[in-house]
Amino acid sequence: MEKQKKIGLFSLILMIFSAIYGFANGTVAYDQMGYASIIWYVLAALFFFLPSALMLAEYGSTFKEAKGGIYSWLAESIGEKMAFIGTFIWLSSWIIWMLSTSTKVWIPLLTLISGSDQTQTWGILGLSSTQTIGILGIIWILSVTFFATRGVSSIAKISSLGGIFVMGLTILFFIASILIWILNKGQLAEPVNGLHSFIASPNPQFQSPMALLSFVIYAVFAYAGMESMGGITDSMEKPEKTFPKGLIISTITITIAYSVSIFLWGVSANWHEVLGGGSVNLGNITYVLMNNLGLVMGHAMNLSHGTSVLIGDILARLTGLSMFMAYLGSFFVLVYSPLKSFIMGSSPKLWPKKMTRLNKAGVPAYSMWIQATVVAVFIFFVSFGGSAAKEFYQILTNMANVSTSAPYLFLIGAFPFFKKRTDLERPFVVYKNKVFTNIIVGIVLLVLIAGIVFTCLQPILDADYKTAFWTIIGPIFFGAVAWIFYRNAEKRSAKENDPASDEN
């Protein structure tokens, strides 16, 4: 039998980079905080990404045979009930991602077709642009679920092609920005005014200390996804050395990549001129900045205005094509994969029988339609809540950030309990000292809790109660649903085990 090839250091670094780094995260950071976002990305890497990734690696290597992913990790550490609730909240982060992406997917598609985001001009049957996008988002999630439940998953392969295009965009962006910087003799479109530029945001929404602290959730979101790497330590060459070394190198590389990309956006985009207007939002920011990059590059090369506009148009369309393919492919995987993994990896007694049943295509169709219905209902209420486009995409971004960060509270909080167990074989150990482990766990939890709390409090202090409600509701709603599911499972189990019920 041929020996399976082990994952080396370089391959591991590439895997971590592709799983974590997101091109659009840099554009969102620049839009929200300008150069000041750099320091938060560095701090998030040091106090969240690196220590939490090492914890997840210990989980993954110890429970490498477990089929339930993070549910198995939590169940073996803090018990079935908290594991079920924690993993349900983790599942909600993917549901919120689908909610957000179902509405955002039309922006790259329209940018590909027309060269710019025209969704804010849409309106059918007297509906506003936001309501129209909401209806289209509902049609999107229902259509994808329809095809996915029938086994039409080959389209998911498009995501890898989209990933290659996005990586190419990243390289193109770096080259174009450096070229503009050289041609403009080091002059930046967004000037640096000493240290102030790196600690103060040009965005009026991020001026207060609490608003600044809430940005930590954006930085944490940019590093999320490491749990997917936790189960591969058994496939590495000398994992006890390869993984920490690869992780440290990846942390440094990704942090530098984010920091440099944020700074380079200042080469071509003056924040107040390009992003200060009302037409730019967190849904179209990437396409606006790429269009502007092409325009500025053309001017820096002394090309005609018409040619410069054409270059910007091409870059915007290329970005639209890349992001649409990535969204489309990812959607067909994520519409069933996290849900199936959770249901199949947890105890069947925790679920109604219909939800655990797989159809001919090998997917839990009934559960997927419940999921699609939940997403559709959320989209309807958010889009018909009277928000303008800018506020609409801010709400979706806040929901995604908080729902993605919340599951880490369970994973990190459970780690000391995981370390207490003496009956486990641990092939990979980094945290060997109990006091040091508890201190690191405390720091990471503090970062997460502070980010979540400040993100939820900020809209309340601004009297923006609608944004506050939708920011908070995700983890609370799905945590409550998980508790109800578990409570009902306990009642069913008690009834089945009750001798009196058998006699009747």
Image: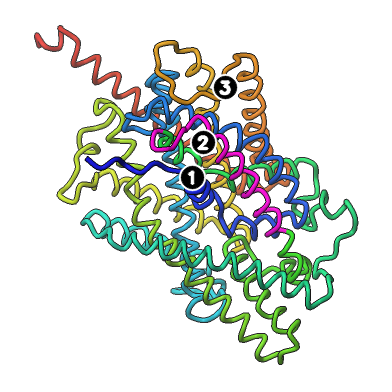
Amino acid type at circle 2 is Phe
Amino acid type at circle 3 is Tyr
Q: Are marks 2 and 1 in contact (CB under 8 Å)?
A: yes
Camera-side residue of 449 and 396 = 449
Taking the view exactly as shown, the residue that stands out farthest to the front is 2
Q: Residues within 10 Å of mark 2 (few under 14, many from 20)?
A: many
Q: Is residue 454 depicted above or below 306 in this figure?
A: above
Magenta residues span 234-262
Is residue 241 inside the magenta stretch?
yes
Residue at label 2? Answer: 243
Is residue 238 inside the magenta stretch?
yes
Report the side of 169 relative to 498 (left or right): right
Q: Residue at x 52, y 64 (%)?
A: 166
- Mark 3 vs 1, N-terminal side: 1
- Mark 3 vs 2, N-terminal side: 2
Residue at label 1? Answer: 12
Amino acid type at circle 1 is Leu
Q: Residue at x 68, y 75 (%)?
A: 292
Label 1 secondary element: helix
Which labelled disc corresponds to residue 431? 3
Camera-side residue of 301 and 366 = 301
State the image coordinates of residue 58 (x, y, percent, origin top left): 48, 27
Q: How far apart are labels 3 and 1 at the CA level?
A: 21 Å
The coloring applied to the image is rainbow
